[in-house]
């Protein structure tokens, strides 16, 4: 018998953002990534008082700290990935977050 918190602990961080096998992939991420992921790749949602839960994966995130926006985005690397293509994909995803910040700072004028 499991509850919502058990499910949350078992599923996050999501394998789609960590890789597989999950535990070793997370160890490698810790070894090679120069910046901690923070909320990126984590869960955003709620746990209710009566056992309900609704979560989503935090991807393409922007975190505001000290009046600066820190943007995080990523791509899915697999054995036959092209590093340049994946880098370009990451840049496109990050630009979407930057554009959202620009629009909000200009009063959402499209």
Image (cartoon, grey):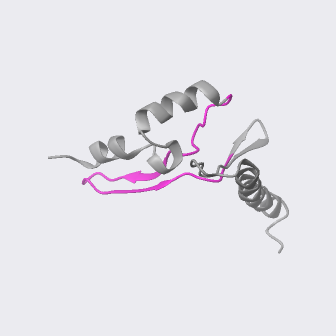
* Residue 101 position in % (x across, y down): 77, 57
At 68% from the left edge and 28% from the top edge, which residue is drawn? Answer: 34
Q: Which residue, as the protein is rendered here, is positioned at the far top? A: 31
Q: Which residue: 42% across, 39% down?
A: 21
Picture coordinates of residue 48, whole percent (x, y)? 32, 53
| Residue sitting farthest toward the bottom | 110
On the image, the x and y values in percent for residue 104 come to 78, 61
Residue 99 in the image: above or below residue 76: below
Q: How many marks?
A: 0
Residue 44 within the magenta-colored segment of the rendering: yes
Query: Which quadrant would residue 23 be assigned to in this image?
Result: top left
In this rendering, position of residue 74 left or right of residue 54 = right
Asked whether residue 18 is drawn in magenta, I would say: no
- Quadrant in the picture for the C terminus: bottom right
Residue under the image location 14 percent in, 46 percent down: 1
Which residue occupies the extreme left position in the image?
A: 1
Q: Is residue 39 left or right of residue 65?
A: left
| Vertical order, 90 against 23 (above or below) | below
Q: Residue at x 79, y 40 (%)?
A: 67
21, 103: nearer the viewer: 21
Q: Which percent across, then down, holds residue 62?
A: 69, 49
Span colored in magenta: 34-62
């Amino acid at each position: 018998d499991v509850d919502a918190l058990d499910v949350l602990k078992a599923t996050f961080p999501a394998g789609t953002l960590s890789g597989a096998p999950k535990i070793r992939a997370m160890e490698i991420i810790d070894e090679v990534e120069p910046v901690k992921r923070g909320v990126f790749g984590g869960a955003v949602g709620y746990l209710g008082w009566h056992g309900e839960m609704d979560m989503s994966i935090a991807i393409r995130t922007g975190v505001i700290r000290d009046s600066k926006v820190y943007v995080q985005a990523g791509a899915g690397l697999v054995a036959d990935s092209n590093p340049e293509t994946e880098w370009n994909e990451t840049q496109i995803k990050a630009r979407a977050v930057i554009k959202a910040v620009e629009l909000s700072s200009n009063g959402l004028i499209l």
